[in-house]
Amino acid sequence: MDVSIVIPLYNEDESLPELSAWIVRVVTEHKLSYEVIMVDDGSTDNSWQVVKEIAENNPNFKGIRFQRNYGKSAALNEAFKAAKGDVVITMDADMQDSPDEVPELHRMVTNEGYDIVSGWKKKRYDNALTKNLPSKVFNAAARWMSGIKLHDFNCGLKAYRNKVTKCVEVYGEMHRYIPVLAKLAGFKKIGEKVVEHRPRKYGVTKFGWNRFINGFLDLVTLSFVGRFGKRPMHFFGLYGTLCFLLGFGISIYLVISKLTVENFALTNRPAFYIALAIMVIGMQLFLAGFIAELIGRNSAERNSYLIEEKLGIMNGNNI
């Protein structure tokens, strides 16, 4: 199968018939074998009934329905498990992503060897103050922290080599950072393509201002886990030791001053309490590192690594 097109949706019953017909027209014109996986993320309108009707008329369309709203990341994660196409393409259901981009995205992955191709909505039709400006700030921060030179991390229109979708777990609200997750998993060829951003034709946006705050916190989490996920003591132990030594050094200075300076009131000085607080913080950080190492040591994933290929190895014996 050439492509699996993944469409997470929430209350999009108006746009689905037009979107599905557009997809069929494009893949038929370009002679691509395909499947379309629509994930109903707990819609409260008639979306699931529309998905069932579309699937009855075209067996290439498949549906997954959540019992309640779990979020876009959960929808993508489940669809990625089910996707069978050589290239997996994601797009939103609100008709702001154009299916006409599918053939070129497929070509860039299959012919140019990209692991991921992310869409870049260079010209946007969103509100400049509430969406465009915060989006630029958010993407600049994501580029700086991740080292991935993409202009639009949150673009719903992306193409993946199938292997990428099987090697990343999308959870929480990490759908914005699938390229970062892929980079941490060892996929390095990440490209970008300018795509058409169409004015919203149906419905209203399902995301608010909190997505920028949550997005930044998720980025900090990914950055930390990527660097210290399997060696937490290197972070907590380092800063715990530095804090303890700083507090201990101040304490030594105060004790020497007490012994050498007449009428030196040790406990009346702010430095005494500062040193004590810093030493306690240092010990807590150090203990946090130990606890994190103990948890990691007993984790089933501690020594799990993504293996590119095995040759001549079976059951631990050479063959």
Image (cartoon, rainbow, N blue to C red):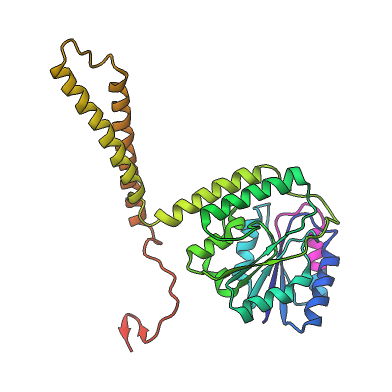
Q: Quadrant of the C terminus?
A: bottom left
Q: Quadrant of the N terminus?
A: bottom right
Q: Is residue 207 visible in this depiction of the protein?
A: no
The mark tally for this picture is 0
Q: Quadrant of residue 257?
A: top left
Q: Position of residue 283 (x, y in %)?
A: 29, 37
Q: List the single residue furthest toward the top.
A: 263
Q: Position of residue 186 (x, y in %)?
A: 48, 68
Judge left or right: residue 300 versus residue 162. Answer: left
Does 319 appear above or below 206? below
Q: Is residue 235 magenta?
A: no
> Residue at point 33% right, 51% down?
234
Magenta segment: 39-53
Q: List the single residue furthest toward the bottom.
A: 319
Judge left or right: residue 185 versus residue 298. Answer: right
> Residue at point 32% right, 28% down?
277
Q: Position of residue 280 (x, y in %)?
A: 30, 32
Does 71 appear above or below 280? below
